[in-house]
Image (cartoon, helix red, strand yellow):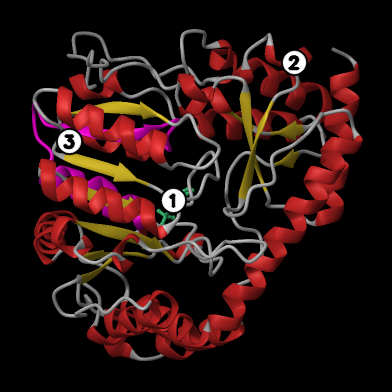
Amino acid sequence: MPLPTSSTPATGKTEPGAKVEKASPPIPEGFPAPEAQRMGLLPRYLLARLNAMNDELRAKGVDVIDLAMGNPVDAVQDEVIEEMRAALSQAKNHRYANPRGIPPVRQAFARHMQRYFGVELDAENEVIMTIGSKDALSHLCLAIIGPSDLCAVPTPAYMIHRYAPILAGGHTIGVPMKEENPGPVLLNDIKTLFQTVRPRPKVLILNFPHNPTSKTVEKSFYEEIVSMAKHYRFWVVNDFAYGHTCFDGYRAPSFMEVKGARDVGAETFTMSKPYNMAGWRVGFLYGNPLLVDLLARIKSYFDYGHFHCVQQAVTVALDKGDDFIRKQAKIYQGRRDALLKGLENNGWGPTVKNRAAMFTWQRIPEQGRKVGSLDFCLQLAQEKGVTLSPGGGFGEEGEGFVRIALVESEKRLTEAADRIGAFLRTL
Ligand SMILES: Cc1ncc(COP(=O)(O)O)c(C=O)c1O
C-alpha cells in the first residue's frame, strides 16, 4: 500500500478559498524566515478562513447563518455557573491547581463513565483532565509519535486526527470509510493496512460518532479492533467527543466498554459538546495507565492544568448534568429533523438521517458538486449568507459533501435550508 505524503493539503488541490485568506506579515529584511519547517506541512485551518469570510460578510451587513463550526450556542446549566461563582470568591482557588485534575473531578468523571457506559476507571491512574480534547490528542501524539512513526486514521478526518501525528514528526495514513456506518469493510481495510504497510503503524486514531461524517459504530466494531490491536500490536485512541449526542434511541458505545480495551488504548472525552462548555476548554483522557502517564508527563512541560474554579465547576457538571445532557441531545435531534426536512423540501434530494453528532454530513446535489465543495460553500455564503463546512476540508474523500452544524434554532435552520434551496435554483 503506498504511503501518503504527510504534507498533502487537507483542502485538496484547488484552493479557491485563498481569496479570503489574510496575507502573512512581511519578514524584516535580513532576518531568516521565522517559520519552522513543520509549518509547511500544515494547511491553513479552514475554519479560520471561513470565520474571516463571515466577518467580511457581517461587516457588509449580511445576516450570516453560520453552520460551519460545531460551536455550541446553548446555555450551560445553572448549577455549574453557580459553583463557578462561589469558587471564584475563595482565594485558595486562584493558585496553581492539580495539573492532572483535582481528585474530585477525576472521581466525578469516573462515576460518570460508570453510570453511562458501565466503564470502571481508576481515577488516580487511568484518568487525566485536559485542556479540551484537542490538547489531549495533540499532546498525546507528541508523547507517543516520533519521526518515522505512522498513525492510521479513517478518512475523511477531523483536522487534529490527521495533523497531530504530523506535528509530532510522524506521518498519517488514511483508511477511506466506504460504508454508511463502519463495519466489516472498514475493519477489513484496517486489517489489510496493518498486515501490509511497513513500518507497521504504531497508533490507530478512531472517532465514533465521527466528525465530520456523523458515522457511528456498534460495540462489536471495537471488539474486533481490540483483538486486531493485540494481534498486530498497535495502540488505539478513540475520540469520543459525540458519545452523548445520539438520536432516535441509538446509544454510542465507549471504546473502553470492551474487554481488554484498556490494555491497548485510551479514549478522549470533552465537556465542550454535551455540556455546551466549549469555551471552558475541558476534556479528559482515560484508559491505559501508561498512555495517561505519558500524557501527564509531556503536559507538565506545557501547562499547569486548569484553573481550580473550573475544575470545581466541572465536578458539579459531571455529577449533576445527566438530565441536562439528555435534553441537549434531544435539542440537536429536533434541529437535525428541521434541517433535513427543510433541505428535502428545497430540492436538495434525499438526505441521510444521521443518528449522532451535532452536525449532519450530506452529499451536495449534482448541480452544486461540479465546482467542488469549497467553492460551493464560498458561493453559497457570498450569495445567501449561509456558511457550511466544505467536505474537501476534511480530506479528498470528503469532496462532494458538506458538513452542516446544528448550531442554530429549528426556525433558523429552516431558514438556512430555504436560502440553500434558493441558491441551488440559481445553479
Ligand atoms: C471529534 C472532535 N474531537 C475534538 C474536538 C475538540 O474538542 P475540545 O473542545 O474538547 O478540544 C472536536 C471539536 O469540534 C471534535 O469534533
- Residue named by callout 3: 168
> Given this view, does label 1 or label 3 mark the residue nearer the observer?
1
Mark 3 crowd level (few <14, some 14–19, many ≥20, 10 Å Cα): many
Q: In this view, does 135 lie to the left or right of 126?
A: right
Report the residue at 17% width, 14% height from top: 32
Q: Identify the disc placed on residue 366.
A: 2
- Residue 65 at x, y = what percent? 76, 41
Mark 2 crowd level (few <14, some 14–19, many ≥20, 10 Å Cα): few
Q: Identify the disc placed on residue 44.
A: none
Report the residue at 29% width, 87% height from top: 104
Amino acid bearing label 3: Ala
Amino acid bearing label 2: Glu
* Labels 3 & 2 near each other (Cβ < 8 A): no
Q: Nearer the viewer, residue 393 or 111?
A: 111
Q: Give the Cα distance between marks 3 and 2.
A: 39 Å
Q: Is residue 331 left or right of residue 288?
A: right
> Given this view, does label 3 or label 2 mark the residue nearer the observer?
2
The magenta region covers: 133-159
- Residue 54 at x, y = what percent? 67, 33
